[in-house]
Amino acid sequence: MLIQTTRDDHRIAWLTALAITIHIAESALPMPLPGVKPGLANVITIAVLIKFGWRLAAWVSLLRVVAGSLLIGTFLSPTFLLSLSGALASIVVLALLSQLPGRGCSAWGYSVVSSMAHTLAQFWVAYELFIQHAGLFHLLPILMTVAFGFGLISGWIANLMLAPRGVSRICRDTD
């Protein structure tokens, strides 16, 4: 039985490969706080959401987490569980925001809310599964502030990608 692939299948594969590349490159960056990363692969998810809808964005995000963790060697580890929980929370808020009347949010709005949902979900999973200590809650304001800042940066990059004269060729619909 021959399975036909669609244009969306090719688009998801290509954009997921791009997001995985960014994810892997980012994992090699030294960070001042353990577990804190800029989340630049989320730029691809936001661009896909705006150009092609939340379903394709969900595929790209989830495939990036699974394939990226397989390539890095963290599949089914605590790192994978944290990454997956963050991605799922991010997808849920992106799906809800994309249903707002009008055009939904801007890349900035999607990115900031997504980043903060991602961080909050990871924090909750870390607390529930790994570190059930009240002192952990002292880190939450710092982590959420960092998430807000990185969300702004990612939103700015996504805006540049989606700009008519920007590097939007990555996400241009060739139909």
Image (cartoon, helix red, strand yellow):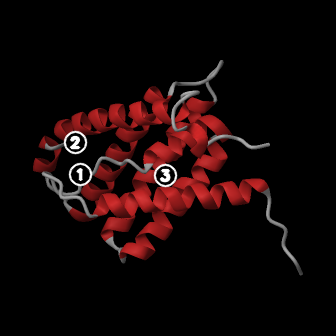
Q: Residue at x 77, y 55 (%)?
A: 7
Left/right of residue 144 with respect to residue 67 in the rendered view: left
Name the N-terminal-most of marks 1 and 3: 1
Q: Is disc 1 placed on a helix, strand or loop?
A: loop
Label 3, on which residue? 88
Q: Residue 139 sits in which quadrant? A: top left
Left/right of residue 125 with respect to residue 52 in the rendered view: left
Name the N-terminal-most of marks 1 and 2: 1
Q: Is disc 2 placed on a helix, strand or loop?
A: helix
Label 2, on which residue? 143
Q: Are marks 1 and 2 in contact (CB under 8 Å)?
A: yes
Residue 113 position (above or below residue 2): above
**Badge 3 density bin: few <14, some 14–19, many ≥20, Cα 10 Å:** some
Amino acid on which disc 3 is placed = Leu
Label 1, on which residue? 36
Amino acid on which disc 1 is placed = Val
